[in-house]
Image (tube, rainbow, N blue to C red):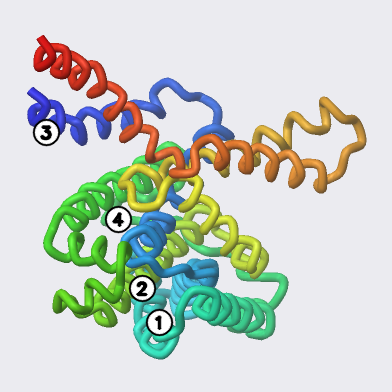
Amino acid sequence: MRDKSKKYFWPVAALLFLTVPLFIESNYILSTLIIIGIYAILVQGLGILMGYAGQVSFGHAAFFGLGAYTAAILTTRFNWYTIPALVAAALLPGIVAAIIGRPTLKLRELYLAMATLGFGILVHIAFNEGGELTGGPSGLSGIPYFSLGGLTFDSDVKFFYLVWTTLFLLLIGVSNLVRSRVGRALRAISESEHAAENAGIDTAGLKLQSFIFSALLAGLAGGLYAFYITFISPSPFSFHASVQFVLMAVVGGLGTLIGPLLGAALVVTLGEVLRWAIPLAIPGAGGEYQIIFFGLILVILMVFQPGGLGALGKLLASSKKLPDRGAGAKVSEG
């Protein structure tokens, strides 16, 4: 029975989400859901890197930006079609990750975090100082809508379907990946890298592959972001964005499949709610109040649920098993 429910989980979940635009008339809510979907694609890769390979990166806003700028430059400067531009948006960050990943991933813990942070800052400076190619601080405008064949994704409803279909296909792929031999090897690295090496696992190779995979997804998310917003500037790809992505991965729950989606949904929704609620509750309050309340809520959440939102499912499942064990104990005692 349980296997049957798992078998139908993805089709039922996909159908539920694909009917969402039929009941939502607000473009603002649809736009928020699209941004959640784009961030969830990025954080899914970061979740693999942090939750399974045990590596921390504060440079994923740079890969996100590289994807966005690649799509924007190829379509506005070189008149590429949107499909090859989106493919290039995913590939370029992956190539950059392959180049910098080999020396960077030899570092551990704080040093690795600092190295990825430095990379992110350098790329952000390049976006600002790129002259005509990147548009400098003013950014690039006139990015075309994404088109597939004769279908142009020029409305929120169409782009919602594009982003969330991509996300669901990604979730199915990642679900199969983490249950494969590679996924088991990544979990072994996360629990103990030395033990994994002694067991014959190529830890350096798998960490590099995870880093490249996460950069590919960040680039894909960046390309989708550029085609949705149709204007980009350096500000969404700063150090602040990298911290936000790490926060989404941690709050959602590392090492869980649904955690990146929950983390992206919580952080984006919480930011929007506070932006609306704080001025009503405290007239004249500035943006610093939003940051304070945002931090307080997340601290409370992590104190009471340190495993993240994605771990709630495991917690509920284990709580359901408790009565069975108790009943078994009574039977054995009898």
Q: Which amino acid does label 1 sit on?
A: Leu
Q: Residue at x 37, y 58 (%)?
A: 51
Tag 4 residue: 148
Left or right side of 280 for 35:
left
Q: Mark 1 points at which residue?
A: 105
N-term mark: 1 or 4: 1
Rounded to the nearest whole Å, what is the CA distance between mark 1 and mark 2?
Answer: 9 Å
Disc 3: which residue = 7
In space, the residues marked 1 and 4 are separated at their CA atoms by 37 Å
Mark earlier in primary sequence (4, 2): 4
Q: Which of marks 1 and 2 is nearer the N terminus?
A: 1
Q: Which of marks 1 and 2 is in front?
A: 1
Percent of width and height locating residue 280 = 82, 26
N-term mark: 4 or 3? 3
- Pick the residue in front: 95 or 300: 300
Using the rendered image of the protein, determine whether residue 253 is visible from the camera's viewpoint: yes
Quarter of the image for residue 215 reads: bottom left
> Considering the numbered disc 1 on the image, is that residue within a helix, a strand or a loop?
loop
Quadrant of image for the N terminus:
top left
**Which mark is on residue 211?**
2
Of the two numbered discs 4 and 3 in the rendering, the one whose residue sits closer to the viewer = 3
Q: Which of 107 and 17 is in front in this view?
A: 107
CA gap, disc 4 to disc 2?
A: 29 Å
Residue drawn where x is 26% and y is 61% of the image: 187
Asked if labels 2 and 1 touch by Cβ distance under 8 angstroms, the answer is yes
Judged by depth in the image, the label closer to the viewer, 4 or 2, is 2
Q: Which residue is depicted at the point 13% across and 14% down?
A: 333
**Residue 270 versus residue 131 in the image, above or below:** above
Image quarter (top left, top right, bottom left or bottom right) of the C terminus: top left
Mark 2, other Cα within 10 Å: few <14 / some 14–19 / many ≥20: many
